[in-house]
Image (tube, rainbow, N blue to C red):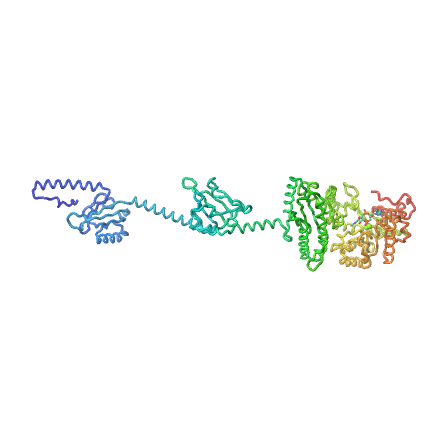
Amino acid sequence: MNDFPTSELLVNDDPADARLAHAALRRSEARFRAMSDASPLGVFVSDAQGRCDYSNVAYQKISGRCFEQTLGTTWSMAIHPEDRQRVLAAWHAAARAQEPFHSEVRFLREDGSVVWTRLNAAPLGDGGTAQAHVWTVEDISVRKSLEFVLCAAEEALFEEKERAQVTLNSIGDAVLTTDLLGNVSYLNLVAEAMTGWSREDALGRPLSEVFAIIDGTTRQAAANPAQRAIEEDRSVGLIADCLLVRRDGVESAIEDSAAPIHNRYGQVTGAVIVFHDVSQSRAMTLKMAHLAQHDVLTGLPNRLLMTERLSLAIGLAQRHGKQVALLFLDMDRFKHINDSLGHVVGDELLQSVAGRLVACVRATDTVCRHGGDEFVILLADIDKPQDAAHVAEKLHVASAVPHLVGGHELHVTLSIGISVYPDDGSDANTVMGNADTAMYHAKAGGRNTYRFFTADMNARAARRLLVEGSLRRALKQDEFVLHYQPQIDLVSGAMTGAEALIRWWDPDLGLVYPGDFISIAEECGLIVPIGRWVLREACRQVQAWRDAGLQAVPVAVNIAAVEFRQRDFVEGIATILQETGLASRYLELELTESVLMHNAESSGSVLEALEAMGVSLAVDDFGTGYSSLSYLKRFPIGTLKIDKSFVRDIATDANDATIVSAVIGMGRNLKQRVIAEGVETREQLAFLQTQRCGEGQGFELSYPLSADDFTRLLAGGDDLQPWCRPAGWDQGPVSPCAC
Ligand code: C2E
Ligand code: MG
Ligand code: MG
């Protein structure tokens, strides 16, 4: 081991002194070595050549080299090669400037591990060569690794902050934060744009100044959501219809929420408000809501909204002891206009009618399109039902003015049903249903009129429903039968024909006459299959009589308007004749005047086709329908049946007698058969005979007979020849039938 330099301790030449000095020197040296080795600082002494001539234990430990390994090495040898250049450059620079040298460098230890150190160099200053230096080396690995951790944490924090910043500025939502006092502490870019406040201007200002919100409905300042979030320490939503007033006064609908911000101890330190512009979606929602509650064609409230308003009006009326009226309107014959002039005209007409209706009522009333050609008007506050009647009259007057649509002058009339709360129902559905029922009665009562709902209408409506259901079953279960009423030549007494009249054997109700179900069958469309059945059955029966060798007469079948309007009506008749094998001259169709006139154009061609087929035509209930007689000449009509209402009073009412005589005369001139219906008395019969009426039909001559009775009649049964007067005539005519 090399000794510590001792030359400076040799003070004289005396051997005893020299020994003493030597011993003192060795002690001092040992003490110094002990002190040096006790130090945690590494010490490395380099000579003028920069080579090590001393290192202490700490240095050896730091450098990972033993004393011997350090001796003779240069001070920079233990430095990590990657740091060496830098350190040498710094060392030379310090030496040139004669400044103390220190540097933080890595030592590469013998075992390859790395240790961070702080290196200091100072000239030894021992009076010897000025190039000798003492190096102290401090192990700073712990501090360094702490520094690294801190640095990494700082970097992570920075990254996190950066990420948050970028995120906050790139999301579509506006974000604004406040401190505990409610002063603005942050705004992202969207918040800047939406509030109109730059971050610079906004920071530190009270929230209410930067984030000015009002209630869209009341237009009052809305409560500050941040304050609530802070006070209640929970997320809170903004009010429903919230408007943000930008710095320049422009308003936008916003939506969203505020939440408290906490520090690491869970204490509330402020609040964050996140909001976004919902102007577009709110406008869309409003539009959707409008669409859901309004009719697209007319823009009027639809049934949904009407029901809502009606319920509301009933609720209010109940509280204030008021009345509410509901008018149910149906345009008469709209279908006809729509079918003949097309949907475009139909649509425009509906719009025109809607406009008129709205003009007739107060702004507080509601006009709704209920669907198709039906409208409903709600008079939310009336004093007496008569007020509703006045409105109905006003509507009739307004609708009397023709509508100019697509170059057409269209006349529209309205059938109106009225029901009133509380008299006619205590809830919206009942009031609405009863107004509908009343409308139906207005229509049945001659159109262009109005009817108040009455309790017995409901009974009828219920009955209608019942009958409709039963009719469907009747068709399936074959519950219909035909009776045949003879038509008699009033001169010879011979039977010239028979009218087929339908009856319904209902298992519950017994025998039902057509007056009780035909109109219902017409309304629900069941008349078409029923009519088919009647035609087929009548044709089949007459052919059966003929096949049986009986003296069969032509059969007259009543045809309803709906049947006549069927596109395949003529083909249907042809098919039935073909299927039953009946010659067409045995079939006559009875049509009323209104059926003929309703579709005068198309009627003509249908009637001609029937005539060409050999089927004859009769006008039923003549005199009760249209007054126009021109069709009698235009259409191929073979028979006129004078309605029984005229026949009833011919013996007593001069007017009726005159009408009947005129019809008889007209028929004779036009070479048409004339049959008087409803001949009930001998007086009537006598009158008709004196007027030279061709034929008659009525109870005085014969009741309608069941098929069996009629068969016996055809077979010449003695008991069944009332019009020939002999047997049984005095007891009255043939009885209705055994049923
Ligand atoms: P309508 O075609 O005018 O038939 C004559 C009606 O007068 C029959 O009533 C008949 O029973 C009745 N009648 C006959 N003689 C007299 C009389 O002397 N006095 C009185 N007061 N009435 C008499 P019904 O059978 O009740 O039929 C009523 C109406 O029902 C018919 O009137 C016809 O319009 C319709 N109808 C009957 N059967 C059918 C049918 O198969 N199809 C269609 N669509 N309608 C039918
Ligand atoms: Mg008839
Ligand atoms: Mg008739």
Residue at coordinates 64% horizontally, 51% vertically from top-left? 300
- Visible in this render: residue 123? yes
Image position of 217 (left or right of 266): right
Image position of 110 (left or right of 249): left
Q: Residue lying farthest right?
A: 726
Image position of 553 (left or right of 336): right
From the image, which quarter does the C terminus lie in? Answer: top right
Q: How many marks?
A: 0
Please state the horizontal and vertical placement of residue 269, each as a whole percent of the image: 42, 42
Q: Nearer the viewer, residue 669 or 293?
A: 293
Q: Nearer the viewer, residue 377 or 146?
A: 377
Asked if residue 177 is positioned above or below residue 599 in the image, the reply reads: above
From the image, which quarter does the N terminus lie in? Answer: top left
Residue at coordinates 14% horizontally, 45% vertically from top-left? 6
Q: Nearer the viewer, residue 593 or 375?
A: 375
- Visible in this render: residue 550? no
Please state the horizontal and vertical placement of residue 382, each as a whole percent of the image: 68, 44
Please state the horizontal and vertical placement of residue 190, each as a whole percent of the image: 47, 51
Please state the horizontal and vertical placement of residue 207, each as a whole percent of the image: 46, 46
